[in-house]
């Protein structure tokens, strides 16, 4: 996995793909402060979904809710 999901501040996530990276909020790795930065680009319209959560699974749950909400408004 690449160390960043961005290049020059712009998402490198391709349509239909996801990118994620874990990072620590605190300088001490044993403290609770590890999070996942996540990006997903919708293949239908190219819209980017980005979020931060403690786990990749939680990020994907948020993405799924976002996709369902988009489907319900179309």
Image (tube, rainbow, N blue to C red):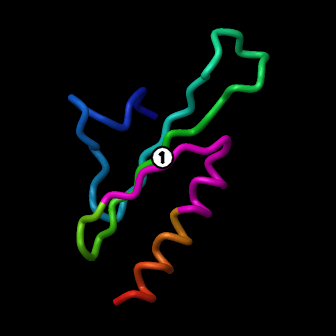
Image point 65% across, 16% down: which residue? 26
Q: Is residue 63 shown in magenta? A: no
Up/down of 58 relative to 5, above or below: below
Q: Is residue 52 shown in magenta? A: yes
Q: Horizontally, is 47 left or right of 56 in the view?
A: left
Other residues around mark 1 within 10 Å, as few (<14) / some (14–19) / many (≥20)? many
The spot of residue 67 in percent (x, y) is 46, 74
Q: Residue furthest top?
A: 27
The quadrant in which residue 54 appears is top right
Image point 57% across, 39% down: which residue? 36
The spot of residue 24 in percent (x, y) is 61, 22
The spot of residue 52 in percent (x, y) is 54, 43
Image point 56% across, 26% down: which residue? 23
The spot of residue 7 in percent (x, y) is 24, 32
Q: Residue furthest front?
A: 73
Up/down of 45 relative to 21, above or below: below
Q: Horizontally, is 25 left or right of 15 in the view?
A: right
Up/down of 35 relative to 65, above or below: above
Up/down of 22 relative to 31, above or below: below
Which residue, given by chain and number where applicable, does mark 1 sit on? 38
SS assignment at label 1: strand
Q: Nearer the viewer, residue 43 or 26?
A: 26
| Residue range corresponding to the magenta coloring | 48-62
């Amino acid at each position: 996995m690449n160390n960043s999901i961005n290049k020059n501040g712009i998402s490198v996530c391709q349509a239909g793909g996801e990118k994620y990276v874990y990072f620590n909020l605190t300088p001490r790795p044993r403290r609770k402060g590890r999070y996942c930065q996540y990006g997903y680009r919708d293949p239908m319209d190219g819209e980017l979904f980005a979020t931060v959560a403690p786990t990749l699974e939680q990020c994907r749950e948020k993405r799924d809710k976002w996709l369902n909400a988009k489907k319900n408004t179309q």
